[in-house]
Image (spheres, rainbow, N blue to C red):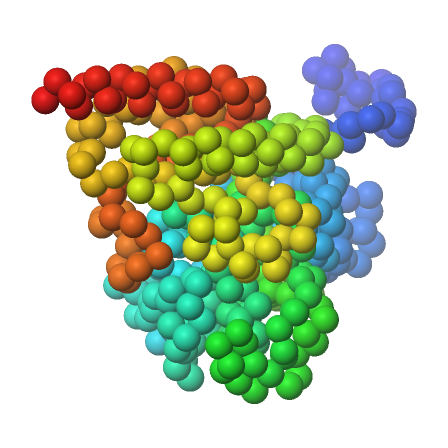
Amino acid sequence: MKYKPHTSLIHAPRKAPQFISTIQPPIYRASTIIFENTDALFNRHWTDDYDYSYGTHGTPTTFTLGDNIAQLEGGEYCLLAPSGLSAINLVNSCFLSHGDEVWVSDNIYGPNMEHLRSLESKYGIVVKIYNPIDVTSFQPSAKAKLIWLEAAGSVTLEFPDLIGLVNKAKSLQILTALDNTWGAGLAFNAFSFRNKISSEKNSKGESFGDEHIDSENLAVDITVHALTKYPSGGGDILMGSIVTQNKTLHHALFRMHALQGISISGDDVAQIQRSLASMPLRYQHQSQSALKLKDWLKEQVEFNQVIHPADESSPGHKYWKEICQTQQSAGLVSVIFNEKYNLTDIRYFCDNLKLFKLGFSWGGPLSLVMLYNLNDMRQLKNSHLQPGLLVRFCIGLEEPEDLIQDIENALKQLREHKNKE
């Protein structure tokens, strides 16, 4: 049948073959997905592994990235979200109801805490805080439903007692959700980390009654990953993921994902897919650069404390060594300045850095710096942290010697500034 020109623009009489082999998979941009016939429409279900029914539910582009992220992290199922925080909020919305108790580490990602406090005030969930390197501070009641873990923690980079915390949570049938952005699926496998401690007692000799736990394959239930960071690698794409091994948990999350109308741009997905192949190389480079920077920072008298999980003096180092058998770590180093330096001094220091730029996030090619007042952020007494203002360095892809020189120059100017007072 011959159509008029305008119709032919929509229903083209000729179509190029749709399937060729390329290094990068094709990009599907879709809201409406065309069903071949009514059988294809009705003989499908939203729980199918690949349910092509509407753009928000998935396309070959989004499913491909999801499969790759799940494989990277050692899981089976993956959902994508518009940001890491969106992925976190999806988990909270899916599993927390009125009266439920949720436990969060004192070093939890700040926006997650804000979201949980909002749920607490509006919908009556109960937020409890624990010390990530002291499992005895995790004292859940019978109403506990979910525990959030971070390895390493936000800003202060404590590496938690994952084995002790997960053992205890599983013995009480509490869901475990790990913010896995720091490890990125490369530093350790969150779905299969070996329990080198007895399955009956932790390092403090506490019994958790976990006789049903497979200590050789201890795992979290859910990981959340800000793909904005290392998977993107460019500092230009926002995205998050939720990975599980359990189909029931995945279906619950997928249902909430659909009800909230969460959708991802195919173009953004393709950008992250393109960056995945280089991610291990970038992670390794930034890990090694951070170690060099950490060793140099420890020699500077301006700092009361240098925090990096791979350093023996850092809080939770023994847990990092136990879990991160690759001996890798994200390119983050935090320092706590001597108390004689006030906020004005620290701002002066940050403003005089040239290579390190002021900005949130990390994992991109550009090194970043951010300053924090822990008194405004922490609710527990943390004896493992020295007093003083904290600065976090996020290492990019620059040469570490140049980054060291940049900090050295800024410290020199800070000393001169302080001597003039």
Q: Is residue 194 left or right of residue 105?
A: right
Give the quarter of the figure containing the N terminus: top right
Give whichever of 333, 115 is nearer the camera.
333
Q: Where residue 273 appears, x then y in whole percent?
A: 69, 33
- Left or right of residue 104: residue 94: right
Q: Give residue 21's quadrant in the image.
A: top right
User: Which residue shows up at 33% across the image and 52% down it?
Assistant: 385
Q: Is residue 35 above or below residue 218?
A: above
Q: Is residue 374 above or below residue 342?
A: below
- Residue extending farthest to the left is 421
- Please indicate whether residue 333 sits to the left or right of residue 336 in the image: right
Q: In terms of depth relative to the viewer, which is nearer, 270 or 325?
A: 325
Percent of width and height locating residue 134: 42, 68
> Residue, x 42% and y 84% (percent of image)?
142
Q: In this orientation, which residue lies closer to the viewer: 108 or 369?
A: 369
Q: Quadrant of residue 352?
A: top left
Residue 237 visible in the displayed image = no
Question: The C terminus is located in which quarter?
Answer: top left
Residue at image point 41% right, 75% down: 136
Q: Is residue 197 above or below residue 232?
A: below
Left or right: 351, with 334 as reference point: left
Q: How many marks?
A: 0
Residue 13 visible somewhere in the drawing: yes
Task: From the top left corner, tell me how far across and down residue 180 is, in percent.
Answer: 56, 51
Residue 264 screen position, x and y as percent: 58, 38
